[in-house]
Amino acid sequence: MEWLGLQFVTELPESGQVILDCSHNPFLVMVAYLVACAASFATLDMAERVVNAEDPGSRRIWRWIGATCLAGGIWAMHFIGMLAFQTPIDIQYDLGITLFSLLIALLASWLAMQTLSEAQPSALHCLKTAFVIGLGIAGMHYVGMAAMKSSATAYYQPGLFALSVAIAIGASFAALWVARYLSEGSGVAHQLLKYSAALILGAGIISMHFTGMAALDLVLPEGGLTASGGDNGHLQLGLTVALIILLILGSAISAALADKKLQNKEEDLRRVNALLSQLDQARMSLQQAANYDALTNLINRRGFNQIFAEKLCQKAAEGGMLAVMFLDIDHFKRINDSLGHDAGDELLKVIAQHIKGSVRSHEDVVARFGGDEFCILINLRDREEARNMAQRIMLKMKEPIELAGRRMVMTTSIGISLFPEDGSTCEELLKHADLALYQSKGAGRNGLHFFSSNLKTRASFELQLEEELRHALREENGLTLYYQPIFELKTGRVTKLEALIRWQHPLHGLLTPDRFITIAENNGLIAELDNWVLRRACKDLGELSRHGCEELKIAWNCSPLNLTRDELANEIEQALRSAGVAPERLELEVTENALMGNIANTLVLLRQIRALGVSLSIDDFGTGYSSLAYLKRLPLNTLKIDRSFILDIPTATADMEIVQAIIVMAHTLHLQVVTEGVESLEQYEFLERSGCDFIQGYLLSRPVPLDELRPVLEEINQRKHSHAVNPLILARGTFAPVSLDPAPKSPAPHAGASVVRPIR
């Protein structure tokens, strides 16, 4: 078969001379391989640019550039390879056919770039395209071979011819397949992979060429061999073509690299712009978060302070009044504890709307400071305007609220300070409004109070006392214990003492617990104070034992807040061990309200204390809300009746009946009964007839310090031996209390008796 003067499947003629000594210039072969590798690398680079280009016009341009580079590289490799072909005869090349072979290469390359432009072409699509491209490259090669003009006839071996076509198709498929994985990526590893792929593809392309050349046989007729004219400048022409095509490929690669850098810079610029936009949004979000409350969308404390400072400067310059109003929702903690924090948050949203609906939206500023605390800044003309607004808010708050399937009514306590009457700075006015709010909560809640100067005086006094109390605890200076005897009716002797703390203040004299216990509870000092009393009482009990009072017990009052501490049992055990006192000689007194505050945890702690051997007493019984069902579960030893039931005996019949019922009930539960506040002989006789076990009060003695205690105990105990019928009745039948000082109408408070005051 003959095509373009080439014999493909025709057998060699029997007559004629076969040229066997054809060779190739090794240097030009290496140049051809270099051109093939450069063309492969450029093609992969152009394919990457086509895939990553965003503009359709740019993709079209890079596609044509890639097709030109591939076509030019393959054609130049073929041309240089032909120039490397050395024969003993002269060979010329037809320019038209040579250019036609270049056109075939260009069409095949354009088809290759069309497929390479796809981000992820399928394997089947790559195979189909590779078949067409391989045929095109083979066609370019054999058309180029047809351009050879010489006296010899070209014959091709069919096997090698088919192998060259297969190599062209395989190399094309390899190029398309590798390009799928090299279209995206960056870094050194990506570049090394691309270089490796270019070397392999270059080897495939040049292998196709020289396989085709190996299939070639040139036949001369007999007597047709003439002297060759040498290489006829083939080396110089080959190097020139190689240089030109390498410059073209280098320029294309440089352009692709510059475009990639430019695109990366554009992407970086877009990322920077996006980041700046995000930062701007984040700044706005942070500003919103910094100045507004996320739950209620009200201004927060920071935003409020900024507006407050501006309005304060304005009012100071122009004149006028401002009111700062603090609001606190009464018993809000019960909502969180009973219904959960989600319900509490929903309630806060509703309350915030109630407050906003009660103020003038264009003049007044409503803020949430945190928790259930709100603050309002009001422009006003007179004091009554602030009062009217506060009353309007309180009335609005009383509207029923549907929450978690319940219908509830909330109340609020309000404190108000005025500018310029109550202060000239933001800090002063806010602090004074807070003090007024504290007064409203202390007065029973659901009320409003304006700031007054005495509130500041009291707050300053309490702050000073707090600092001095810390110092007194730290230095153990000024604090002391007084002891009040507890008389056992059955034995006619003092068998117990109640330890009562006193503070010998350098300026204010001897302070009773009602002056400083609440301060200690509100400022985290109560645990340290209670522990000091415990250790001192145990130490004093050891001292009394060394002076013949081995049977005495000491009752120690424990603050309700201390019952929440798991360390209490260990502290009691350590104090007893340090003083060398038996646990049975210590009695812990707690109020019934403290017991019932958290009955489950309290019960565990009391059982731990009881397991040490320490007795337990419930103090101020009858004034709280203890349940008899829980009372029988508590590991108690003693029940102390509050003095309020004794005060009007014997004139109050109802009180007498209540006391008798309590004594019977306590004995039924196997509890001993102590009655405190006994001040008259009639009260003593009534309690003795009713079966009371112990009495305590000014009838026996006032609380006295340790160094005055033993004479008092001896005097009380000696009466048993002097008066068999009644140790407190003298021979002439008159009432004679031990203390020579007249008994005051109200008893002295003790360390465990805390004045309940609202705590914010």
Image (tube, helix red, strand yellow):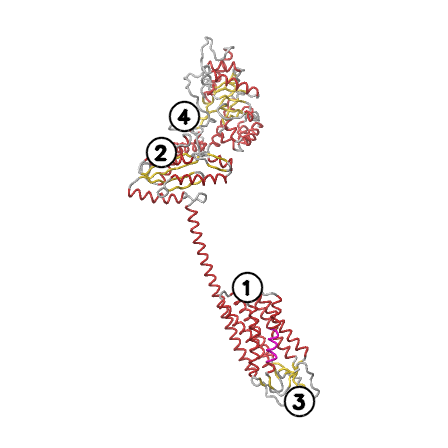
Quadrant in the picture for residue 702: top left
Separation of marks 4 and 2 at Cα, in angstroms: 33 Å
Q: Image check: 157 left or right of 753?
A: right
Q: Is residue 530 above or below residue 279?
A: above
> In what element is the residue under mark 4?
strand
Viewer-side residue, 321 vs 131: 131
In the rendered structure, find residue 184 and report the number of the disc placed on it: 1
Amino acid carrying mark 4 in the image:
Leu
Under mark 2, the amino acid is Phe
Query: Residue 297 in magenta?
Result: no
Badge number at residue 510:
4
Q: Residue 648 vs residue 613: left or right? A: left
The answer to whether residue 271 is above or below residue 73 is: above
Residue stretch rendered in magenta on the structure: 133-143
Tag in front: 4 or 3 = 3
Q: Report crowding for label 4: few under 14, some 14 to 19, many 20 or more residues within 10 A (C-alpha).
A: some
Mark closest to the chain's N terminus, 4 or 1: 1
What residue sits right under mark 3 in the picture? 221
Question: CB atoms at circles 2 and 3 under 8 Å apart?
Answer: no
Query: At label 3, which amino acid type do we have?
Result: Pro
